[in-house]
Amino acid sequence: MKQDIYNIKKSLDTSKGKLSYYSLPELEKQGHNISKLPFSIRILLENALRNYDDFSVTKDHLKTVLNWTPEQSEKDVAFKPARVLMQDFTGVPAVVDIASLRAEMARKGGDASKINPLIPVDLVIDHSVQVDYFAAQYAYDKNIEEEYKRNKERYTFLKWAQQSFDNFSVVPPGMGICHQVNLEYFSKGAIARDGMVFPDTLVGTDSHTPMVNGIGVVAWGVGGIEAEAAILGQPIYFISPEVIGLKLTGKLPLGSTATDLVLTIANLLRKYGVVGKFVEVFGPGLDNLSVPDRATIGNMSPEFGCTITYFPIDDKTLEYMRDSNRSEEQIKLVEEYCKANMLWRQDEDKIEYTDVVELDISTIQPTVAGPKRPQDKILLKDLKEKFIELEHASFGRTYIEPSEREEAITRWKEEGGSQPTKQPHDPAPDVEIEKAEMKNGLKTVWISHGNEKYMLSDGAVAIAAITSCTNTSNPFVMIGAGLVAKKARELGIDVKPWVKTSLAPGSKVVTDYLEKADLLKDLEALQFHLVGYGCTSCIGNSGPLPPEISRAVEENDLIVTSVLSGNRNFEARIHSQVKMNFLMSPMLVVAFAIAGRVDIDLTTEPLSCDRNGKKIYLKDIWPTDDEIHAVMSKVLTPKDFKKNYDEIFEGNEIWRNLEVPKDKLYQWEDDSTYIKEVPFFHNLSDDPQPLKNIEGARALLMLGDSITTDHISPAGAFSEDSAAGQYLISRGVEKKNFNSYGSRRGNDEVMVRGTFANVRIKNQLADREGGYTTYLPTGEQMSVYDAAQKYIADKTPLIVLTGKEYGSGSSRDWAAKGTILLGVKAVLAESYERIHRSNLIMMGVLPLEYVKGESAASHGLTGNEVFSISGIENDLSPLKKVTVSAKTEDGKEIEFKAIARLDSPIEVAYYQNEGILQYVLRQFLKQ
């Protein structure tokens, strides 16, 4: 078979010698209008040309990209990434799957070593560090010590994988966040491999992988299952994307940051609707955005809903590569290749986009987002009014101004309230809590702690976290935060005593330049001590609140808040006791920690007073852009990147001393509660079973709109009363050693019990919040897991009924794995987020979608019906309309059509094989 069917393979003299490449200008000479294609589509085209084999990448795949038009298409694109990025929460289950595939291959007499990564995989351990210790010099050391205690078995397993698999590297704990490490170190722009040069591309098992779109790398997040298939040589298939052009003009005004810009874009693009689409950024405003600014925007692509937010390679890209210590040889290769192959940002006016959305970035104002969705933009000046509105609308409480709260407490005490009570389990016996009972009013308590006495009210900031690669990768806002702290110190103001503060940057480069700028001591003076180099609060690893705060919140149902420089703020994600979460720049995180509450207009009200009662305003501590740039020019050097990335794989002494087995097959331990062989591949038949219709199904859950993968498969801590907690206790694990759901993703027994167990999930088939449902045959309420086990014992198939944007949020494969293990055969939704729909198919769950304009409500469904779905077993094809029949309790039949969201022939094949990995394993076994 001839691979180069268009005769466009050429050679290029580069800084790395003579390399061959697939030439897009040669295609243009043949009459194909490449100039009108968006840059991101050009990269997909080059990928298809280079990987064409007329089997997994066919002529049809080539023609689809070559003849790309701005209109919506139903045709498939095949894509083979150059590499894969993982983090440990999603990486551990992926490695467990691959090790399990090896085990089944061996059981069937095959060569287990064939199950091996075929492209480079970089796994960064960044999701497991928790903020147990804070506001102290020793916080970082103690947190990493606790991290190893909790995760030794997982880390030993990953170190085994590094030794056992080819093309597999692991960045040890405490070194950085995967996306920041990817931006600062892994990303190449162009790759020279096997005598060829081609664009650097990747998929990552984390939804924020598009961060490196900011450095000109096409990359997006996929589920762990899809990534595993890519690792094993399978293309990733998806519908040819529409490409929305985001035209930026102007320049950020003084006082506004890239964070304000990205939160504005999140709101703008969510309203426009870019789910499943590519976004490509162009226009003169790009010339005013650095790569860290661009990366901040790329990072939040999943919050916009799009697959990527691509920034083509230009002079700013090369400038950043130079600043971050890429070699001159590599920088020249990127420039030579991109200019030779129509991938350099120029001639933007010739490109035809599906549509263009415009934004004048000179109009950006200081912005936050929340309280539970990243796209819910609130201007800083409007936050107080918004809080008052939310408190009334969501909790039925009337706002009381701070000046009136003390009077309300005093009056209540005089009227004969109960006396302050001692906290029985508090390590500090001198804590007293007094509360005010104000019917339907804002709640306030007095807390006496040692010599301190303070008022804690609804709207108080319980957590202030400078966290997440989204913003800590941007020196402008990090140095800005340091300068805010410095000025606050100089003016004699401090953070409030009830605020849990933390600093968790995405790489050690950040603390190096903060130390050189002499700003780390200022952040520490305001108790923003280094707690770790990892995701921490952004992923929900905030650690416990101080006991007195936790008790006050729990007993008095206070609505406390978090402020963080992250990218996600879904319900119960940051902390189970924190009901409102607001995203903002690191600079504003420091300011709100000082104010101690979000019910304040920082643009007009003082954020604090000094010891003399002088009012200090935000403008008094806010640095100018010139001040920030002056510090940046002094402290940012390539040497910092070199120093830290020369030792990125070394790890600390604990990592180096981890002893790992040398076997190619992993030796599963029966008593392990962390690492367990998955049940998906046991006794896999040589050929897939015939498809069958779904008959006599019951609804396990009936859910509303915007159900996230956090709702479906939470990542954070869990209680001993939960199904997962009960399981671990039965296995002899104490509550203090539970760790988190995310850290236990290598054990299906824990994870299936954690599916639909988010404490904030609202199932309409239960009358209580959390992971509960009704076992419909008896009407008994119980945990989702217990009900599912009863249905499985009855041989009753299950479905989930839900609304719009089902599965938004993280690329969490356990949200699909847990669903199938609960016995769910189909999900019926009004719409899906891209990654989760794909993950469901790859685990053998059928994603069904109501016909446009229809819903559970329009069909009068209550969730109590008995469901049958026909049209599956005969000629199942992409986007086929199947028939759903729902029989009510009184015998009435409701019948309607739904779309089987298998969008391509390969997705039908995955579904027929009960999942993508079963499909891949069968291919290996046939070979």
Image (cartoon, rainbow, N blue to C red):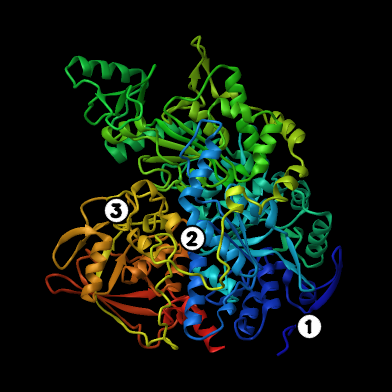
Residue at image point 63% right, 43% down: 361
In this image, 739 relative to 170: left or right?
A: left
Instruction: Tell me the SS state at disc 3.
Output: loop
Residue at image coords 26%, 29%? 441
Real-space Cα separation, disc 2 to disc 1, in angstroms: 39 Å
Name the residue at 68% across, 73% down. Answer: 47
User: Which SS class for mark 1?
Assistant: loop
First-in-chain label (1 vs 3): 1
Task: Pick whichever of labels 2 and 1 is earlier in the sequence.
Answer: 1
State whether residue 765 appears in this view. no
Q: Is residue 484 above or below residue 733?
A: above
Q: CA distance from mark 3 to mark 2?
A: 24 Å
Q: Marks 1 and 3, how far apart in space?
A: 61 Å
Quarter of the view holding residue 246 = bottom right
Query: Residue 433: percent from the left, percent from the top?
Result: 29, 24
- Which class describes the residues within 10 Å of circle 1: few (<14), some (14-19), or many (20+)? few
Q: In this image, 547 relative to 244: left or right?
A: left
User: Which residue in the protein does label 1 denote?
Assistant: 7
Residue positioned most to the top: 612
- What amino acid type should be assigned to the residue bearing mark 2? Ser
Residue type of the residue flagged with mark 1: Asn
Q: Whole-percent x and y of residue 576?
A: 36, 44
Q: Which residue is mark 3?
A: 722
The image shows residue 837 at horizontal and vertical percentages of 44, 67
Q: Nearer the viewer, mark 2 or mark 1?
A: 2
Label ID, residue 811: 2
Along the line of sight, which residue is nearer the eye, 803 or 325? 325
